[in-house]
């Protein structure tokens, strides 16, 4: 019974894709593998032996004070720019940007942020958004670009504040440990 339903759903999906122009099919096909690869590398590449728990480079890179969370956010921001270039609607861009910002803002907090990155997996969440979305025939508009530029500006501001706070905390720790 289950396989009949799945088979019927896959045929429906095939029919849905048939109504899209060929160039739109290529756009979607080009976007999904990018996000799949990014989600795998950043959030799922390493499996904890004996469990089903997986994590990626994102929480490991986040352990590097100052630049770790910034690097992860920049990789995710690149994927966001690709999404706008290929016509993903603003509502989905907003959800994706929110995932990136939440990961970055919580990631700034030492120890707690790193533990959060193991669980939250913003790139995997963004891949799920892209995977369930079907691109329509709309090209990105000026409003889409303004939106993404605004989100990137906020992301850069959060990153800069995070770096500044990291250096302040590291400086305070050095003064506390070495009495300088």
Image (tube, rainbow, N blue to C red):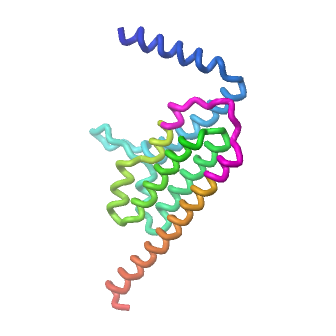
Left or right of residue 143: residue 72: left
Q: Position of residue 53 (x, y in %)?
A: 32, 41
Q: Position of residue 103 (x, y in %)?
A: 43, 54
Q: Is residue 101 magenta?
A: no
Q: Nearer the viewer, residue 66 or 20?
A: 20
Q: Is residue 145 left or right of residue 35?
A: right
| Image quarter hosting the C terminus | bottom left
Image location of residue 78, percent across then percent down: 60, 51
Where residue 101 sits: x, y (%)? Answer: 48, 55
Q: Kindly identify the residue that appears in the image at 70 percent across and 44 percent down.
A: 141
Magenta segment: 129-147
Q: How many marks?
A: 0
Residue 2 sits in which quadrant?
A: top left
- Which residue sits at x=54%, y=42%? 91
Q: Quadrant of the rendered structure where residue 83 is?
A: top right
Image quarter in which the N terminus is found:
top left
Q: Give me the residue at 61% from left, 39% from top.
A: 88
Residue at the spot 56% in from the left edge and 63% down from the top edge: 156
Look at the picture and state if 71 lies above or below 39: below
Q: Is residue 13 above or below residue 149?
A: above
């Amino acid at each position: 019974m289950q396989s009949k339903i799945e088979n019927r759903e896959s045929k429906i999906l095939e029919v849905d894709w048939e109504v899209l122009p060929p160039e739109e099919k290529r756009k979607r096909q080009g976007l999904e593998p990018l996000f799949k690869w990014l989600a795998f590398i950043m959030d799922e590449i390493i499996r904890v032996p004996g469990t089903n728990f997986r994590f990626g480079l994102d929480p490991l890179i986040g352990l590097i004070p100052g630049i770790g969370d910034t690097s992860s956010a920049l990789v995710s921001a690149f994927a966001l720019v690709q999404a706008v270039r290929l016509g993903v609607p603003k509502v989905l861009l907003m959800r994706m940007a929110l995932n990136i910002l939440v990961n970055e803002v919580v990631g700034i907090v030492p120890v707690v942020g790193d533990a959060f990155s193991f669980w939250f997996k913003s790139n995997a969440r963004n891949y799920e958004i892209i995977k369930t979305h079907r691109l329509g025939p709309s090209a990105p508009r000026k409003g889409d670009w303004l939106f993404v530029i605004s989100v990137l500006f906020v992301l850069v501001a959060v990153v800069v504040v995070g770096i500044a706070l990291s250096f302040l905390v590291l400086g305070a720790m050095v003064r506390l440990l070495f009495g300088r």
